[in-house]
Amino acid sequence: EAGKIADSLGYRAYVVGGFVRDLLLGQKNLDVDLVIEGDGPIFARRLAETFSGRVSVHEKFKTAVITLPSGFKIDVATARWEYYAYPAALPTVELSSLKLDLFRRDFTINTLAIKLNPGEFGQLVDFFGGLRDLKDGVIRVLHSLSFVEDPTRIFRAVRFSARYGFRIGRHTLDLLKGALKLNLVDRLSGRRLLNELRHILSERDPLPAIRQMAELDLLRFIHPDLKLTEEGEGLIKETEASLSWYRLQFGEENLKIWMVYLLSLFDRLDQKRFATALARLEIPEKKIRTLLEERGRLFRALEHFKKTHSISKSAIYRSLEGLSSEMLLYGLAKARDQASKQAITLFLRELRKVRPAITGQDLKKLGIPEGPIYKKILETVRDARLDGLVQNKEEELQLVH
Ligand code: CTP
């Protein structure tokens, strides 16, 4: 359909980048990127109309995002002929605007395009040898300034290489190391660095990429003391295990998986360095304070669980109350002894949902004057309920009496 619309407007339409790469690799990819030789926004509006989708247009950059009723998203970019007006001496036939658009990209495996116009539908366009690199399993840049132009590509190279088990080409690796020598990563904003890290830690299995970051000595850009030890690798594996357990129990449930891995990756940093690393990533100060406070509490809880023989449910509750699921799952991965692991799983599965059956209203009816005492009473009742001392509302009311 996209091809027909392009034809009717006198444009050419291509699907490009990650979608084509993953299509050829037989992997799932739900992000469709289109490049239009013509006017992207005009095309996007037509396409959205045809599929009753919504469209949001960025007229200045001639880009658009179409959201179909199913939630499926299509990115549309423009490669304009007139934009790339080249001197007559250059072989302009060769320099199609699509080629120039693709030349700006990171790696050859991301430069493949497929034509969508009906006459040529399905034709693969491969200007830079992407197909061969895809077959050989090589990550290769298009030109020697690639990492200098955009140092986030250093992390992207690691991510793609780890994800697909590809190697980084020799020349590309030299260029990458050259960029590292120049400390170009230091110039990346925290926001961009975090974005790359988040992508890496959101991979299905982030360990290979983390290992590769450590091998290339990339972790120092997050914090000079950040290292990956053998013990650290163990913790990442434990993190994976605790996340699988959580998924089985609760499904995805808008858990920030990357955050659990980040906490594990930062495990060996003391609180001060932990805060410095988060600040480098431009995590907002308020969020850093929360994470510090929760992390401190988690560490104390783990110490407490390790030392205490048979701990009551109410004591577990009080130790872990209010900690985010991410922090708890990091704690579950970090806990060595069975008792601590059991305490955290029990809290996640059952305890954290427990509330007393009585409410403030009931206390009011009993004639108790309102005030901070209410919180105290309700907490005591909750503890009693957790420890099985009361089991229903009547028993709770009796306890209050
Ligand atoms: N790109 C780039 N340089 C960057 C980021 C992106 O050249 N720093 C290009 C890549 O060629 C990529 C395209 O922009 O194909 C889209 O980027 P993105 O959606 O991040 O990448 P995908 O290849 O789709 O990767 P993923 O599978 O992780 O979504």
Image: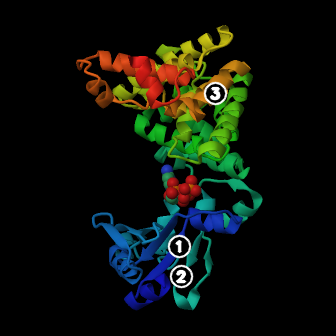
Residue picked out by circle 3: 332
* Disc nearer the start of the sequence (3/2): 2
Tag nearer the camera, 3 or 2: 3
> What residue is shown at x 23% (from left), y 20% (from top)?
370
Check residue 15 in the rendering and tell me which mark sits there, or answer none.
1
Q: Quadrant of residue 188?
A: top left
Q: What crowding class fits label 2: few (fewer than 14 Cα within 10 Å), some (14-19), or many (20 or more)?
A: many
Q: Which residue is rendered at x = 23% and y = 18% of the image?
A: 369
Where is residue 62? Give x, y as percent.
33, 68
Q: Residues within 10 Å of mark 3 (few under 14, many from 20)?
A: many
**Mark 1 sits near ligand 1, with its Cβ under 8 Å away:** no
Q: For residue 53, what is the image quadrant?
A: bottom left
User: Which quadrant of the view contains residue 214?
Assistant: top right
* Residue type, numbered disc 3: Leu
CA distance for labels 3 and 2: 49 Å
- Out of 279 and 13, give the one closest to the viewer: 279
Using the image, determine if residue 277 lies above or below residue 61. Answer: above
Front-most of 296 and 273? 296
Q: Residue at x 60, y 18 (%)?
A: 268
Earlier residue among tags 1 and 3: 1
Residue 116, disc: 2
**Looking at the figure, which quarter contains the C terminus?**
top left
Secondary structure state at the residue bearing disc 1: strand
Secondary structure of the residue carrying numbered label 3:
helix
Q: Position of residue 321 (x, y in %)?
A: 48, 24
Amino acid marked by disc 1: Val
Position above or below: 317 against 148: above
Mark 1 or mark 2: whose residue is earlier in sequence: 1
Residue 110 appears left or right of 71: right
Q: Are marks 1 and 2 in contact (CB under 8 Å)?
A: yes
